[in-house]
Image (cartoon, grey):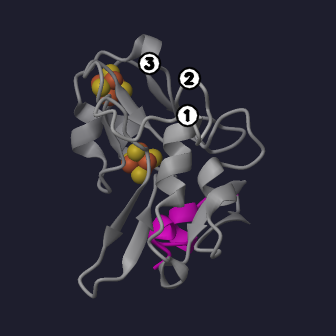
């Protein structure tokens, strides 16, 4: 299975990953047409400064035992057994925010425009490679192949690269 792997020491803080995430989930999917001042639009990944002032890319870990899935009573969140991707079906989402409160990493949040359903990384469903991975020019965000079980045990704090 493929997972996003973060090497924070390579991050330049350019936020290309955020912009391309915004673009991928916009109607045009184009970085040229995405409206960066649209308060109703937010990326599903982030770059934040750590205590040393180093930028650190953050993204969903698609956990082996995802708390967001465990907390979702409507079945909107599920883990795809074939890919291990934690996916979200907005049609089934009740907007109760249990997942938002349950994710230990703060990587699922209410939709900024409607505030009715939650949104999270979908691994850029339908693409061979997530846009953030393609957009990262320094190699701070890459894809790695991981075993199909015990991912978090074998690669603790995978998405932070720790
Ligand atoms: S949203 Fe949070 S709990 Fe759910 S898979 Fe991603 S990191 Fe894990
Ligand atoms: S907000 Fe939606 S996805 Fe999250 S727990 Fe509630 S129903 Fe499930």
Q: Nearer the viewer, residue 153 or 20?
A: 20
Residue under numbered circle 2: 27
Q: Which quadrant of the figure has residue 57?
A: bottom left
Q: Earlier in the sequence, mark 3 or mark 2?
A: 2
Select label 1 or label 3 by which is in front.
Answer: 1
Check if residue 52 falls in the magenta segment.
Answer: no
In the image, residue 127 above or below residue 153: above
- Residue farthest front in this picture: 32
- Residue farthest right in this picture: 128
Q: CA distance from mark 1 to mark 2?
A: 9 Å
In the image, residue 128 above or below residue 1: above
Q: CA distance from mark 1 to mark 3?
A: 25 Å
Q: Earlier in the sequence, mark 1 or mark 2?
A: 2
Q: Is residue 139 visible?
A: yes
Residue under numbered circle 3: 90
Lateral position of residue 10 relative to residue 82, left or right: left
Select label 1 or label 2 by which is in front.
Answer: 1
Lateral position of residue 59 relative to residue 5, left or right: left
Residue under numbered circle 1: 33
């Amino acid at each position: 299975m493929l997972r996003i792997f973060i090497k924070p020491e390579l991050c330049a803080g350019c936020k290309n990953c955020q912009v391309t995430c915004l673009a991928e989930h916009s109607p045009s999917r184009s970085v040229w047409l995405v409206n960066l001042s649209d308060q109703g639009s937010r990326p599903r990944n982030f770059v934040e400064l750590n205590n040393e002032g180093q930028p650190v890319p953050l993204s969903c870990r698609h956990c082996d035992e995802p708390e967001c899935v465990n907390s979702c009573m409507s079945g909107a969140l599920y883990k795809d057994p074939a890919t291990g991707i934690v996916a979200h079906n907005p049609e089934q989402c009740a907007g109760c925010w249990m997942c938002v409160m349950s994710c230990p990493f703060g990587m699922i949040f209410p939709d900024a425009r409607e505030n009715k359903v939650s949104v999270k990384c979908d691994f850029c469903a339908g693409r061979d490679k997530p846009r953030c991975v393609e957009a990262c020019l320094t190699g701070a965000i890459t894809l790695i192949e991981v075993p199909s079980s015990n991912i978090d045990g074998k690669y603790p704090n995978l998405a932070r690269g720790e």
